[in-house]
Image: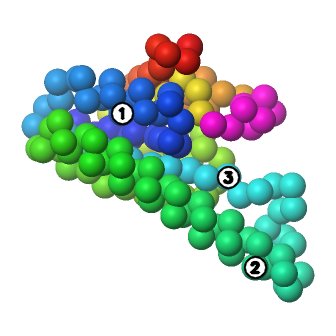
Amino acid sequence: MKIVLAIDGSDFSKAAVEQLNRMTLPSNTEIHLINVYEFPTALGPELMAIGGSLNHYFEEFINGAQKLGNEIVTEASDNLKSINKTLTITTSVVSGLPKIAILEKAEEWDADLIVVGSQGQGALSRLLLGSVSQYLATHAKCSVMIARDKNNS
């Protein structure tokens, strides 16, 4: 079984990890943990061509987002491995629109299941672009499990 687990560090994505931990998974299960960070669209990547101090801002943002994303996927990977040592886990931290990047990863990887939290950290993005979990549920070619955090529902 191949599972894409999309996480952003929110309580809702932690609930997704916990629900996956409670499932009885086949011994050959592969999990790909993905964290997607959005590039700050207020300024846009086009301004990087201007140079100067803006380049420094973008480099700091990307480095910080990569570092935080790596911490998030490492924590989730360690959590999953502590419960089920037979899992094969890979990770990625990428820039893009979460709903598109997650869907592309699932299709590219030929996933059987996508697991996401019911909500993420991006309230503004959700308002403007729509729910990631809703988009995945209606567009994915595989099954989608949407985990809820009972404490924050």
Is residue 113 at least partly visible in the picture?
no
* Marks 1 and 2, the one that precedes in the sequence: 1
Q: State how many labels appear.
A: 3
Q: What is the spatial separation of the Cα atoms under label 2 and label 3, in whole angstroms? A: 17 Å
The answer to whether 3 is drawn above or below residue 34 in the figure is: above
Specify start and end residues of the magenta stretch as a single range.
Answer: 121-129
Q: Which residue is mark 3?
A: 38
Nearer-N-terminus badge (3/1)? 1
Q: How far across and down, in percent of the image, does residue 96 sit?
A: 64, 54
Q: Position of residue 116 (x, y in %)?
A: 47, 31
Circle 3 crowding by C-alpha within 10 Å: few under 14, some 14–19, many from 20? some
Q: Is residue 128 above or below residue 52?
A: above
Q: Which residue is mark 2?
A: 56
Magenta: predominant secondary structure element?
A: helix
The N terminus: image quadrant: top left
The residue drawn where x is 54% and y is 23% is 118
First reached walking from the N terminus: tag 2 or tag 3: 3
Q: The residue under label 3 is which amino acid type?
A: Glu
Q: Residue furthest front?
A: 151
